[in-house]
Image: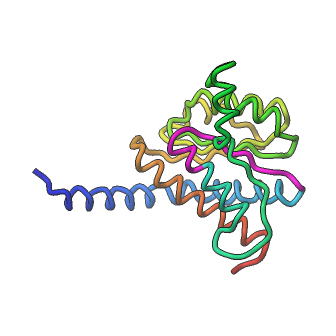
Amino acid sequence: MKTIEQRIAEHFAASIATKQQVAGKLGPHIARASKVMVDCLKSGGKILACGNGGSAADSQHFAAELVGRFEREREELAAIALTTDSSILTAVANDYSYDEIFSKQVRALGKPGDILFGISTSGNSKNVITAIEAAKKKGLIVIGMTGRNGGKIGEMMGERDVLLNVESTVTARIQEVHLLTLHCLCDAIDNIMFGEK
């Protein structure tokens, strides 16, 4: 039987291995996504982020880094996590459907040229898919952050959109790479917009 310390060491080793395996494939897509985000922000647009569970936390984390700061003092950047207003979420889920909790906000808040940042470890979260459908109808660019084979979200990406897919089947590893990807995006946005630190 493994000790707890051995299990912990295995988690660290697996996390490191997954990051090394996906870095080469994911890097160019992260760079492209950061440029798309910078173009949006520079032209007065905003980034709307959504996801469920850990991906909801990632949405909020990303919006907080842009509105507040990442690793330097700079002007605030426009980002909204669509996961935070409990009155909207519960009213829409109750009156319509849980599948509509993000899409109704996209239709209310999104403008052409804005970005919808949809996060789903499976790539198949129905409410994120519905939000992407709403975003495309309104002229938003979509950045999808997924795992496994990208799922339905991967199939929805158009020419203007960017897919950040972590090719792993382990949810914990996907989420760990998603967090690193968020930090890479924040760093790239800051460096493109405000110069190298």
Report x, y in % for residue 118. Answer: 65, 41
In-image side of 79 versus 42 (left or right): left
Q: State which quadrant residue 183 falls in.
A: bottom right
Residue in front for this viewpoint, 114 or 52: 52
Residue in front for this viewpoint, 104 or 149: 104
Which residue sits furthest bottom? 197
In-image side of 155 versus 171 (left or right): right
Q: Residue at x 74, y 37 (%)?
A: 158
Residue in front for this viewpoint, 106 or 114: 106
> Which colour assignment does the render follow?
rainbow
Image quarter in which the C terminus is found: bottom right
Which residue sits furthest top? 96
Residue in front for this viewpoint, 100 or 132: 100
Does the segment drawn in magenta span residue 40?
A: no
Establish if 51 lies above or below 6: above
Report x, y in % for residue 61. Answer: 60, 55
Query: What residue range appears in magenta?
Result: 44-58
Q: How many marks?
A: 0
Which residue sits furthest left? 1
In-image side of 42 versus 76 (left or right): right
In-image side of 98 versus 178 (left or right): right
Establish if 188 lies above or below 30: below
Q: State which quadrant residue 72 falls in.
A: bottom right
Report x, y in % for residue 186. Answer: 66, 63
Does the segment drawn in magenta span residue 45?
A: yes
Q: Residue at x 72, y 72 (%)?
A: 191
Q: Residue at x 69, y 37 (%)?
A: 157
